[in-house]
Amino acid sequence: MESTERFRILFVEDDERLAALTSRYLEARGHTITWVSDGRAGLAEALKGQHDVVILDVMLPRLSGIEVCRELRSRSATPIIMLTALGDEADRVLGLETGADDYLAKPFSSRELLARLHALVRRGRGTLGPPREVLRVGDLELSPREYAATLAGRPLHLTTAEFVLLRVLAERAGRVLSREQLLDLTKGSADEAFDRSIDAHVSRLRHKLHDDPRRPRLLRTIRGAGYLLTAGEEEGA
């Protein structure tokens, strides 16, 4: 049974045929699509804050998808899924490190795209798993209902994927979680691109937590096992 959720999608894509076919598929399932064909116009539209999720092509005229993603992510937490015909792993990781929440290579299945869109919007709305009022790990506080996080009272500006990953780690603070466990607990795609992006998300989280990557106190790497979130009181392993 298809979901009854309906949401507003911004589609930034310069391939008119692909945009038309994909838009028709999504509109037939009740979603509202705004299509823009170049990066500069796409960024301006995205910054209006009127969309639940952004589908963003990497190769765009006037402003590349990577540039759009970087600028949008610095000013908004709207979920972003990037599309590209490029198959190199470095290009996938670059998009994710820039702030994209998910990645889909062309050619893609419209059904898979829709499934990923639903997952991203649910993350953004905080509807994956039972919410708690407030999660506290040392100076870190997360409010799943408001999709907000602070460190020592200072707000953290996180993407949807970063927030969900941090929430999962905070709910199990003090426990080592493998990549496979993190994928399962965040309800992320189990494909290769998303699996390898776990490291990129952790790297970005450390940066936003002001955690020294060479000797992290909060978000630690346990070699050969996975990741561990602590209160940061004891010395790094």
Image (spheres, grey):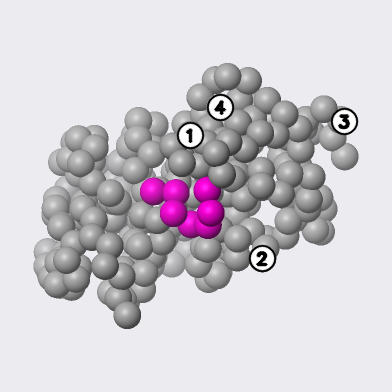
Is residue 128 rendered magenta in the image? yes
Cα distance between the residues tagged 2 and 1 = 25 Å
| Mark 2 secondary-structure assignment | helix
- On screen, residue 5 versus residue 21, left or right, reads right
**What amino acid type is highlighted by mark number 2?**
Glu
Question: Counting residues from the N terminus, which is met first, the one under dot 4 or under dot 2?
Answer: 4
Question: Counting residues from the N terminus, which is met first, the one under dot 2 or under dot 1?
Answer: 1
**What amino acid type is highlighted by mark number 1?**
Ala
Residue 78 in percent (x, y) is at 34, 43
Question: Counting residues from the N terminus, which is met first, the one under dot 3 or under dot 2?
Answer: 2
Residue at the spot 63% in from the left edge and 20% down from the top edge: 152
For the residues labelled 4 and 1, say whether their Cβ atoms are less than 8 Å apart.
yes
85 shown above or below 91: below
The residue that mark 1 highlights is 148
The residue that mark 2 highlights is 180
The mark closer to the camera, 2 or 1, is 1
- On screen, residue 129 versus residue 146, left or right, reads right
Cα distance between the residues tagged 3 and 2 = 26 Å
Cα distance between the residues tagged 4 and 3 = 22 Å
Residue segment shown in magenta:
125-131
Q: Is residue 113 visible?
A: yes
The mark closer to the camera, 4 or 2, is 4
The residue that mark 3 highlights is 235
The mark closer to the camera, 4 or 3, is 4
